[in-house]
Image (tube, rainbow, N blue to C red):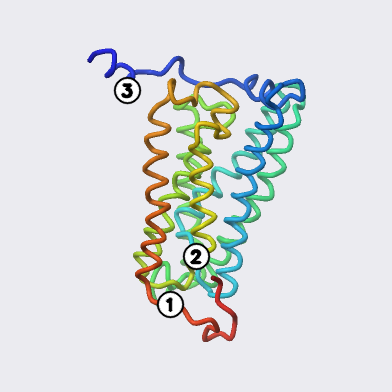
Amino acid sequence: MWSFLHGLFSTYNGTTYSLQDFVHAFSFSNPHFASVAFVAGLTFAIGFIEYIYSFLLVNHEYSSPYNVMMHTYYFAIDSMGIFVFALASHAVGGFWIFTGASIAEVIWTLFEVYNIIKCVYVEREEIWGKGVTVASAWWRMLGWIVVMVGTVNLFRVFMNDPAMFKWYIFTNILMGIMPGLYWEKRGTRVGASWGLAIVICIGTINSFLPTNMWASVSSYFSVTNNPWFYVIGVISIFFSIRTFWVLGKLPNKPKILQNGKKSIW
Protein backbone atom coordinates (compact mmCIF):
# COMPACT_ATOMS: atom_id res chain seq x y z
CA MET A 1 0.00 0.00 0.00
CA TRP A 2 2.72 2.47 0.98
CA SER A 3 4.64 1.66 -2.17
CA PHE A 4 1.54 2.35 -4.27
CA LEU A 5 0.88 5.66 -2.51
CA HIS A 6 4.52 6.63 -2.84
CA GLY A 7 4.36 5.97 -6.58
CA LEU A 8 1.32 8.21 -6.95
CA PHE A 9 2.04 11.11 -4.64
CA SER A 10 5.80 11.37 -4.16
CA THR A 11 8.47 12.82 -6.42
CA TYR A 12 8.99 10.68 -9.50
CA ASN A 13 12.59 9.63 -10.14
CA GLY A 14 14.10 13.09 -10.03
CA THR A 15 12.52 16.45 -10.54
CA THR A 16 13.09 17.27 -14.17
CA TYR A 17 14.65 16.60 -17.56
CA SER A 18 17.79 18.25 -18.98
CA LEU A 19 18.71 20.12 -22.14
CA GLN A 20 20.98 17.22 -23.00
CA ASP A 21 17.89 15.01 -23.27
CA PHE A 22 16.87 17.12 -26.26
CA VAL A 23 20.36 16.96 -27.74
CA HIS A 24 20.32 13.17 -27.57
CA ALA A 25 16.74 12.74 -28.79
CA PHE A 26 17.08 15.09 -31.76
CA SER A 27 20.61 14.16 -32.81
CA PHE A 28 20.87 12.45 -36.18
CA SER A 29 22.99 9.78 -34.49
CA ASN A 30 20.04 8.72 -32.33
CA PRO A 31 18.73 5.43 -33.78
CA HIS A 32 15.20 6.58 -32.95
CA PHE A 33 15.66 10.02 -34.50
CA ALA A 34 13.14 9.46 -37.30
CA SER A 35 10.31 8.50 -34.95
CA VAL A 36 11.12 11.29 -32.49
CA ALA A 37 11.24 13.88 -35.28
CA PHE A 38 7.97 12.57 -36.75
CA VAL A 39 6.09 12.79 -33.45
CA ALA A 40 7.51 16.25 -32.72
CA GLY A 41 6.71 17.46 -36.23
CA LEU A 42 3.16 16.13 -35.96
CA THR A 43 2.71 17.83 -32.58
CA PHE A 44 3.91 21.18 -33.93
CA ALA A 45 1.85 20.83 -37.12
CA ILE A 46 -1.35 20.17 -35.19
CA GLY A 47 -0.70 23.28 -33.10
CA PHE A 48 -0.36 25.39 -36.24
CA ILE A 49 -3.54 23.91 -37.74
CA GLU A 50 -5.46 24.72 -34.55
CA TYR A 51 -4.51 28.35 -35.02
CA ILE A 52 -5.31 28.38 -38.72
CA TYR A 53 -8.84 27.45 -37.68
CA SER A 54 -8.84 30.32 -35.21
CA PHE A 55 -7.96 32.75 -38.02
CA LEU A 56 -10.64 31.32 -40.30
CA LEU A 57 -13.36 31.45 -37.67
CA VAL A 58 -12.67 34.94 -36.39
CA ASN A 59 -12.41 36.31 -39.94
CA HIS A 60 -15.46 34.52 -41.36
CA GLU A 61 -17.71 34.34 -38.30
CA TYR A 62 -16.31 37.22 -36.21
CA SER A 63 -15.96 34.85 -33.27
CA SER A 64 -12.87 33.00 -32.05
CA PRO A 65 -12.99 29.36 -30.92
CA TYR A 66 -10.80 30.20 -27.92
CA ASN A 67 -11.50 32.52 -25.01
CA VAL A 68 -9.43 35.53 -24.07
CA MET A 69 -7.62 33.76 -21.23
CA MET A 70 -6.41 31.08 -23.63
CA HIS A 71 -5.15 33.73 -26.04
CA THR A 72 -3.26 35.63 -23.33
CA TYR A 73 -1.86 32.44 -21.81
CA TYR A 74 -0.62 31.24 -25.18
CA PHE A 75 0.85 34.67 -25.89
CA ALA A 76 2.70 34.54 -22.58
CA ILE A 77 4.11 31.07 -23.00
CA ASP A 78 5.00 31.48 -26.69
CA SER A 79 6.63 34.89 -26.29
CA MET A 80 8.66 33.63 -23.33
CA GLY A 81 9.54 30.54 -25.37
CA ILE A 82 11.39 32.73 -27.88
CA PHE A 83 13.92 33.66 -25.21
CA VAL A 84 13.99 30.33 -23.37
CA PHE A 85 14.70 28.32 -26.52
CA ALA A 86 17.23 30.86 -27.78
CA LEU A 87 19.08 30.67 -24.47
CA ALA A 88 18.89 26.87 -24.52
CA SER A 89 20.35 26.88 -28.04
CA HIS A 90 23.20 29.10 -26.87
CA ALA A 91 23.81 26.89 -23.83
CA VAL A 92 24.30 23.74 -25.93
CA GLY A 93 26.23 25.27 -28.81
CA GLY A 94 23.42 26.26 -31.16
CA PHE A 95 21.66 22.91 -31.36
CA TRP A 96 19.17 22.96 -34.22
CA ILE A 97 15.99 21.95 -32.38
CA PHE A 98 16.27 24.83 -29.91
CA THR A 99 17.10 27.33 -32.65
CA GLY A 100 14.20 26.11 -34.76
CA ALA A 101 11.83 26.15 -31.78
CA SER A 102 12.79 29.73 -30.96
CA ILE A 103 12.01 30.79 -34.54
CA ALA A 104 8.74 28.84 -34.46
CA GLU A 105 7.80 30.65 -31.27
CA VAL A 106 8.20 33.99 -33.04
CA ILE A 107 5.61 32.81 -35.55
CA TRP A 108 3.30 31.50 -32.83
CA THR A 109 3.61 34.75 -30.89
CA LEU A 110 2.61 36.70 -33.99
CA PHE A 111 -0.37 34.36 -34.32
CA GLU A 112 -1.39 35.34 -30.82
CA VAL A 113 -0.84 39.05 -31.45
CA TYR A 114 -3.24 38.73 -34.38
CA ASN A 115 -5.81 36.91 -32.24
CA ILE A 116 -5.50 39.44 -29.45
CA ILE A 117 -6.05 42.30 -31.90
CA LYS A 118 -9.17 40.53 -33.17
CA CYS A 119 -10.39 40.11 -29.59
CA VAL A 120 -10.17 43.85 -29.07
CA TYR A 121 -11.51 45.10 -32.39
CA VAL A 122 -13.96 42.35 -33.38
CA GLU A 123 -14.99 40.40 -30.27
CA ARG A 124 -14.75 42.91 -27.42
CA GLU A 125 -18.50 43.19 -26.82
CA GLU A 126 -18.92 39.42 -26.94
CA ILE A 127 -16.08 39.08 -24.43
CA TRP A 128 -16.67 42.01 -22.06
CA GLY A 129 -20.22 43.14 -22.78
CA LYS A 130 -22.05 45.87 -24.66
CA GLY A 131 -20.55 49.33 -24.75
CA VAL A 132 -16.95 48.31 -24.04
CA THR A 133 -14.64 50.76 -25.80
CA VAL A 134 -11.50 49.83 -27.70
CA ALA A 135 -9.37 51.58 -25.08
CA SER A 136 -11.07 49.73 -22.23
CA ALA A 137 -10.67 46.43 -24.07
CA TRP A 138 -6.95 47.06 -24.54
CA TRP A 139 -6.45 47.82 -20.85
CA ARG A 140 -8.26 44.62 -19.89
CA MET A 141 -6.26 42.63 -22.41
CA LEU A 142 -2.96 44.08 -21.19
CA GLY A 143 -3.96 43.22 -17.64
CA TRP A 144 -4.44 39.58 -18.57
CA ILE A 145 -1.14 39.53 -20.47
CA VAL A 146 0.77 40.89 -17.46
CA VAL A 147 -0.84 38.28 -15.21
CA MET A 148 -0.09 35.43 -17.60
CA VAL A 149 3.52 36.42 -18.32
CA GLY A 150 4.24 36.70 -14.60
CA THR A 151 2.53 33.40 -13.82
CA VAL A 152 4.26 31.47 -16.59
CA ASN A 153 7.71 32.66 -15.54
CA LEU A 154 7.16 32.14 -11.83
CA PHE A 155 5.95 28.58 -12.25
CA ARG A 156 8.62 27.80 -14.84
CA VAL A 157 11.14 28.47 -12.06
CA PHE A 158 9.09 26.65 -9.43
CA MET A 159 8.77 23.60 -11.70
CA ASN A 160 12.48 23.56 -12.58
CA ASP A 161 11.55 23.70 -16.25
CA PRO A 162 14.69 24.70 -18.22
CA ALA A 163 13.11 24.49 -21.69
CA MET A 164 9.47 25.13 -20.68
CA PHE A 165 8.75 21.53 -21.64
CA LYS A 166 6.54 20.96 -18.60
CA TRP A 167 4.67 24.19 -19.25
CA TYR A 168 4.05 23.29 -22.87
CA ILE A 169 2.02 20.21 -22.04
CA PHE A 170 -0.44 22.58 -20.36
CA THR A 171 -1.06 24.22 -23.74
CA ASN A 172 -2.33 20.88 -25.02
CA ILE A 173 -4.26 20.14 -21.84
CA LEU A 174 -6.09 23.46 -22.16
CA MET A 175 -6.66 22.90 -25.87
CA GLY A 176 -8.24 19.55 -25.15
CA ILE A 177 -10.49 20.79 -22.36
CA MET A 178 -11.40 24.44 -22.81
CA PRO A 179 -12.79 24.96 -26.34
CA GLY A 180 -15.70 22.57 -25.86
CA LEU A 181 -16.60 24.17 -22.53
CA TYR A 182 -16.37 27.63 -24.10
CA TRP A 183 -18.57 26.67 -27.04
CA GLU A 184 -21.08 25.13 -24.66
CA LYS A 185 -21.18 28.32 -22.60
CA ARG A 186 -21.77 30.47 -25.69
CA GLY A 187 -24.59 28.19 -26.85
CA THR A 188 -23.88 28.56 -30.56
CA ARG A 189 -21.85 26.88 -33.27
CA VAL A 190 -20.78 30.28 -34.55
CA GLY A 191 -17.09 30.50 -33.72
CA ALA A 192 -16.95 26.72 -33.33
CA SER A 193 -16.06 24.05 -35.87
CA TRP A 194 -16.44 20.32 -36.38
CA GLY A 195 -13.16 20.30 -38.28
CA LEU A 196 -11.36 22.04 -35.44
CA ALA A 197 -12.89 19.64 -32.92
CA ILE A 198 -11.43 16.73 -34.91
CA VAL A 199 -7.99 18.35 -35.04
CA ILE A 200 -8.08 19.09 -31.29
CA CYS A 201 -9.08 15.52 -30.48
CA ILE A 202 -6.30 14.07 -32.64
CA GLY A 203 -3.80 16.50 -31.13
CA THR A 204 -4.83 15.66 -27.58
CA ILE A 205 -4.58 11.92 -28.16
CA ASN A 206 -1.20 12.42 -29.84
CA SER A 207 0.04 14.36 -26.80
CA PHE A 208 -0.70 11.55 -24.36
CA LEU A 209 0.08 8.35 -26.20
CA PRO A 210 3.04 6.53 -24.61
CA THR A 211 4.99 7.54 -27.73
CA ASN A 212 4.25 11.25 -27.23
CA MET A 213 6.84 13.96 -27.89
CA TRP A 214 7.56 14.50 -24.19
CA ALA A 215 8.25 10.83 -23.44
CA SER A 216 10.29 10.57 -26.66
CA VAL A 217 12.65 13.24 -25.34
CA SER A 218 12.96 12.25 -21.67
CA SER A 219 12.07 9.25 -19.53
CA TYR A 220 10.88 11.77 -16.94
CA PHE A 221 7.60 11.79 -18.90
CA SER A 222 7.18 8.02 -19.10
CA VAL A 223 4.16 6.24 -17.65
CA THR A 224 6.30 4.67 -14.93
CA ASN A 225 8.05 7.85 -13.85
CA ASN A 226 5.17 10.28 -14.19
CA PRO A 227 1.74 8.60 -14.03
CA TRP A 228 -0.09 11.88 -13.38
CA PHE A 229 0.99 13.07 -16.81
CA TYR A 230 -1.19 10.31 -18.25
CA VAL A 231 -4.00 10.75 -15.74
CA ILE A 232 -4.49 14.33 -16.93
CA GLY A 233 -4.09 12.99 -20.45
CA VAL A 234 -7.10 10.71 -20.03
CA ILE A 235 -9.09 13.64 -18.62
CA SER A 236 -8.07 15.90 -21.51
CA ILE A 237 -8.92 13.27 -24.12
CA PHE A 238 -12.32 12.76 -22.49
CA PHE A 239 -13.11 16.47 -22.74
CA SER A 240 -11.86 16.67 -26.33
CA ILE A 241 -14.25 13.83 -27.22
CA ARG A 242 -17.03 15.46 -25.20
CA THR A 243 -16.71 18.48 -27.52
CA PHE A 244 -18.41 16.47 -30.27
CA TRP A 245 -21.37 15.89 -27.96
CA VAL A 246 -21.45 19.63 -27.20
CA LEU A 247 -21.44 20.53 -30.89
CA GLY A 248 -24.15 17.99 -31.61
CA LYS A 249 -26.48 19.71 -29.13
CA LEU A 250 -25.91 23.22 -30.45
CA PRO A 251 -28.11 24.65 -33.23
CA ASN A 252 -26.74 24.51 -36.76
CA LYS A 253 -25.14 27.65 -38.11
CA PRO A 254 -26.14 28.85 -41.59
CA LYS A 255 -23.83 28.07 -44.48
CA ILE A 256 -23.91 31.75 -45.41
CA LEU A 257 -23.74 34.10 -42.44
CA GLN A 258 -25.40 37.50 -42.05
CA ASN A 259 -22.11 39.13 -42.98
CA GLY A 260 -22.27 37.37 -46.35
CA LYS A 261 -19.34 35.06 -45.63
CA LYS A 262 -19.36 31.27 -45.67
CA SER A 263 -19.36 29.59 -42.28
CA ILE A 264 -16.57 27.19 -41.37
CA TRP A 265 -17.49 23.52 -40.94
Determine the CA span between mark 2 and mark 3. 36 Å
Determine the CA span between mark 1 and mark 2. 11 Å
Answer whether labels 2 and 3 touch (C-beta < 8 Å).
Answer: no
Instruction: Name the residue: 56% across, 23% down.
Output: 218
Q: Count neighbours of disc 2 (C-alpha within 10 A) and say few if under 14, some if 14 to 19, many if 20 or more.
A: some
Kindly indicate the quadrant of the structure image that contains residue 199.
bottom right
The mark found on residue 252 in the picture is 1
Quadrant position of the N terminus in the picture: top left
Dot 1: element: loop
Instruction: Name the residue: 35% across, 64% down.
Output: 184
Dot 2: element: helix
Q: Count neighbours of disc 3 (C-alpha within 10 A) and say few if under 14, some if 14 to 19, many if 20 or more.
A: some
Task: Report the mark closest to the observer, 2 or 3.
Answer: 2
Instruction: Name the residue: 63% across, 33% down.
Output: 84
Q: Residue 141, how many percent across, how many down?
A: 49, 58
Badge 1 amino acid: Asn
Foreground of the two, 265 or 95:
265
Label 3 sits on residue: 8
In primary-sequence order, the first of circles 2 and 3 is 3
Q: Residue 192, how many percent across, how many down?
A: 48, 67
Dot 3: element: helix
Determine the CA span between mark 1 and mark 3. 44 Å
Kindly indicate the quadrant of the structure image that contains residue 60.
bottom right
Q: Residue 188, how many percent across, how many down?
A: 40, 73
In primary-sequence order, the first of circles 1 and 3 is 3
Quadrant position of the C terminus in the picture: bottom right
Label 2 sits on residue: 194
Q: How many labels sit on residues?
A: 3
Badge 2 amino acid: Trp
Badge 3 amino acid: Leu
